[in-house]
Image: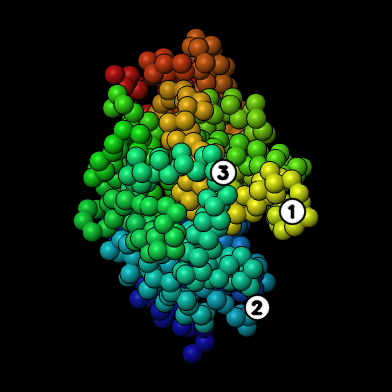
Amino acid sequence: MTQFEKVFRNSALHPKPVGLVLQYGTAGFRTNAKELDHIMFRMGLLAVLRSKKTKATIGVMVTASHNPEEDNGVKLVDPMGEMVTPSWEEYSMQLANAEQDVLLTALKDVIEKEAISMDQDANIFIGKDTRPSSEKLSQAVSDGVMSLGGHVHDYGVVTTPQLHFMVRCQNTQGCYGSPTMEGYYRKLSQAFVQLTKHVRQSTFHQWVHRLTSSKHLLVDGANGVGALRLRDMERFLQNQLQISLFNDCREGKLNFQCGADYVKVQQKPPQGVEMSVGERCCSFDGDADRIVYYYKDSDGCFHLQDGDKIATLIGTFLKDMLTQAGLDLQVAVVQTAYANGSSTRYLEDVLKVSWCTTGVKHLHHAAQEFDIGVYFEANGHGTVLFSNAAVHKIEKLAQDSSIKNEKKRTAAQLLHSTINVINQAVGDAISDMLLVEGVLAVQGLSVQQWDAIYSDLPNRQRKIKVADRRVITTTDAERRVVTPPGLQEAVDMLVKKYPQSRAFVRPSGTEDIIRVYAEADTQENTDALAQEVCLAVYRLAGGVGEEPKPLH
């Protein structure tokens, strides 16, 4: 039996519902788990082709991240642990949406276009989250891989960033680390221990006091895989960080009233977490690639430190360390239009700010243009990228025993430890948590002091249903509208009415919805601006249904 005959036979065991069309979004395919069996099989096929084309190991992660438990999804991981290249996203939709009788034709079309040698070996790493559907769906991926003769290494239940890490380690022949769970735990925890060992004596007692008085770091695991894997990692941290873990999968539903997305959207603590005044708290999302921090002040008010605050903390720390080490490397923070205006104004006084289109894959690509690129979406998904040249300069300086200046030597060693505590493949809640904790320790900052670096402007996000989202096109990293005529001028006029205000509109990537973002000096003004922009979009961009109503 030929490979194609085997694919044809096995694809009948994972049939596609006639007429079902799904899109590969920023995070891959994602929908109700009942509709994904054929998608998983076909992504197994595509992963084999991608592996043969790149002559490298490819990852396939079965997860729906922060979505409800009944959903699931899948995405491919490219050789350096990054998201799959955009041209192959098109192939993924070509295979996923091909009707059953033309699947082989679609498959052969990819092979021909990419000039793939089917004699080349293919190696696929598979991971899955804790959803009830993940076991069966990951098996469908394996069925697809094996139908085309690929080799499967199933890591079982892992966080999404851990699978990205494994792929990068494998394809760098161990230079980035060992492609094992223990390799992941050891690399990150040892770097964190080294980072916190460099805490100055004057700030060390503040750090210890803060840990003691706040009863450790409270972590909301979203009842997801991040909770399980963080528990595994604790023994590697050598008591340098003590964790109280909540929503740890023992009871409760995945992402239900907990997790990073819930905390970010609802602006309140997750269910099951009892916060004392001033305690540092953080929440992961379901597959542990997002993180947000928060705390409660003495008046009982909730304070959120999202991706903007994390990027600011890390970016300014790296800039300070480079200055102290005497290294001429450019640090940039990459932002999207959704970044809070206060964060942008603060950062522009300290280091370079670069703009890009919304979406992690765009942020990641933009961050690669700098010696050190820091990127975090407001939702808490982000990481730091170091160029090879930057890594070489930092390592060389950190290992130079001839340096007499203690401040310079310590800064170089801190930078070196920082590189290793970061998962450069993708945003990683566990890695980012260790980085934030390490930076706070080194700088002797409490969570309140971190929060006080700048104050977020009130903001509001809304959406308007339209007949065709393609009527709106944008430029300047989605911050300004090109079409329809008159809409940007209307937004500009509305923004002038309110102090410290900003607003933009952008089309959804998957549905006929226009997203509206507004911010201003007060929540009242913000909501008023958002309402007026919504009305402008409705009237000028073909809104459907009733006119948008004020929220209050």
Q: Closer to the observer: label 1 or label 2?
A: 1
Q: Earlier in the sequence, mark 2 or mark 3?
A: 2
**The one of 493 and 310 positioned closer to us in this rendering:** 310
Q: Quadrant of the C terminus?
A: top left
Horizontally, residue 96 falls left or right of residue 416, namely left
Specify the farthest residue to the left.
251
Residue underneath mark 1: 397
Q: Tag 2: Cα neighbours inside 10 Å, few (<14), some, or many (≥20)?
A: few
Q: Residue at the location (30% across, 64% down)?
A: 133
Residue 114 at x, y percent in the picture: 65, 68
Q: Earlier in the sequence, mark 1 or mark 2?
A: 2
Q: Which mark is residue 117?
A: 2
**The one of 375 and 33 positioned closer to us in this rendering:** 375
**The one of 186 and 34 positioned closer to us in this rendering:** 186
Q: Which of marks 3 and 1 is nearer the N terminus?
A: 3
Alpha-carbon distance for marks 2 and 3?
57 Å
Question: To which quarter of the image does residue 321 belong?
Answer: top right
